[in-house]
Image (cartoon, helix red, strand yellow):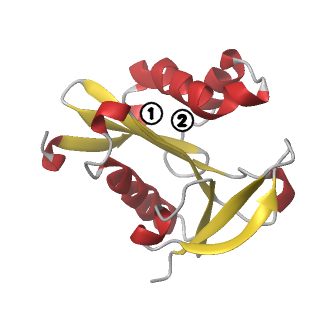
Amino acid sequence: MVLENIKVINLLDDIDYLEEVSEWIYEEWEKKYNRKLEDIIYRSKHSLNRNDIPQMYIAKYDDEVVGCVSIWRCDLKSRQDLYPWMAALFVKKEYRNQGIGKLLQEKVIEETRKMNYKNIYLITEHENYYEKTGWEFIEKAPLENGSYTKIYKYDLTK
């Protein structure tokens, strides 16, 4: 696969993949919080925006969707003072470590910058992934289940 053959588009432009990417989000993150797939599909349907948040983007390789990412108003209840958030960055296992995650991040950064935000945030459990693409660690924050997550910020003014 060649990275130049990957197209990152707004899910609004190809909504046939809405349920598939909602299933990825459910399996990867939401299932462990006992949320329902139907709730995730409903949330995804209400993320079909072009000029405001929330938004969803998909990475396509030919006619296959291989990744997704979202821009949300809030991804951490305890830090509603921070927004917007890059969330639900996912790449199918067989397509990982090929730069697709970076392409998805770049799309979110580009689109969020167009909306005139100064920063964008994310939460993650990953170690040394987002630092490679310019994200700055801010702090650890508590989650609903009693564990902690890391908050990162990306300066959109640079």
Residue bearing the label numbered 2: 48
Does 83 appear above or below 38? below
**Few, some or many C-alpha atoms within 10 Å of disc 2 (few <14, some 14-19, many ≥20)?**
many
Residue at the (68%, 30%) spot, across then down: 30
Mark 1 touches mark 2? (CB < 8 Å) = yes
Residue 125 position in % (x across, y down) = 62, 53
Q: Position of residue 151 (x, y in %)?
A: 67, 64
Q: What residue did someone put label 1 on?
A: 12
**CA–CA distance between discs 1 and 2?**
5 Å
Label 1 residue SS:
helix
In the picture as drawn, the residue positioned furthest to the bottom comes out as 158
- The quadrant in which residue 62 appears is top left
Residue 36 at what x, y percent from top left?
Answer: 73, 18
Q: Give, as a three-letter code, the residue at label 1.
A: Leu
Q: Quadrant of residue 2?
A: top left
| Residue 149, placed above or below residue 152 | above
Query: Label 2 is placed on what type of residue?
Result: Leu
Q: Which image quadrant: the C terminus? A: bottom left
In the rendered structure, the answer to whether residue 86 lies left or right of residue 84 reads left
